[in-house]
Amino acid sequence: MTSGLPDWTVWVLAAVVAGLFGWFFWHTGVSLYRYSRQVIDLIQNWPQVRRAMVEAEARSGGRYPFWFRAIRVLLVLAMIGFAMLLVWRKIAGA
């Protein structure tokens, strides 16, 4: 004679799944809280961080040479131009 209750392994599996869900939500909540505290601390301490970065850059004679910054700007402008060309060709071809 069988009863209407499931086997004991189903109860164990359900408890494990419920525990994993609980751990996931706890871990996600703690992680969100920790990362939000890091962002808040960064925002609050940003003037000191920025000042230290500027002072270090001034001591080392600049972060990047002028030619490197110019090439970087040209590459970014070229990527934007090629993206606009691609969009224009897609629209014109449609």
Image (spheres, rainbow, N blue to C red):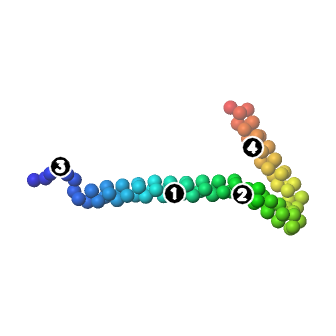
Q: Which residue is mark 2?
A: 45
Viewer-nearest residue: 12 or 42: 42
| Residue 7 x, y percent position in the rendering | 22, 56
Q: Which residue is mark 3?
A: 4
Looking at the picture, does residue 64 appear above or below residue 4? below
| x 61%, y 56%: residue | 37
Q: Which residue is mark 4?
A: 83
Q: Secondary structure at mark 3?
A: loop
The kind of residue on which mark 4 rests is Ala
Q: CA distance from mark 2 to mark 1?
A: 22 Å
Q: Secondary structure at mark 4?
A: helix
Q: CA distance from mark 4 to mark 2?
A: 38 Å
Looking at the picture, does residue 33 appear above or below residue 85? below
Q: Secondary structure at mark 2?
A: loop
Q: Which residue is mark 1?
A: 30
Q: Secondary structure at mark 1?
A: helix
The kind of residue on which mark 2 rests is Asn
Camera-side mark, 4 or 2: 2
Q: CA distance from mark 1 to mark 3?
A: 40 Å
- The reply to whether discs 1 and 4 touch (Cβ–Cβ < 8 Å) is no
Report how many numbered discs are placed on residues in the image.
Answer: 4
Camera-side mark, 1 or 3: 1
Looking at the picture, does residue 90 appear above or below residue 63? above
* Local crowd size for mark 2, using a 10 Å CA cut-off: few (<14), some (14–19), many (≥20): few
Camera-side mark, 1 or 4: 1
* Local crowd size for mark 1, using a 10 Å CA cut-off: few (<14), some (14–19), many (≥20): few
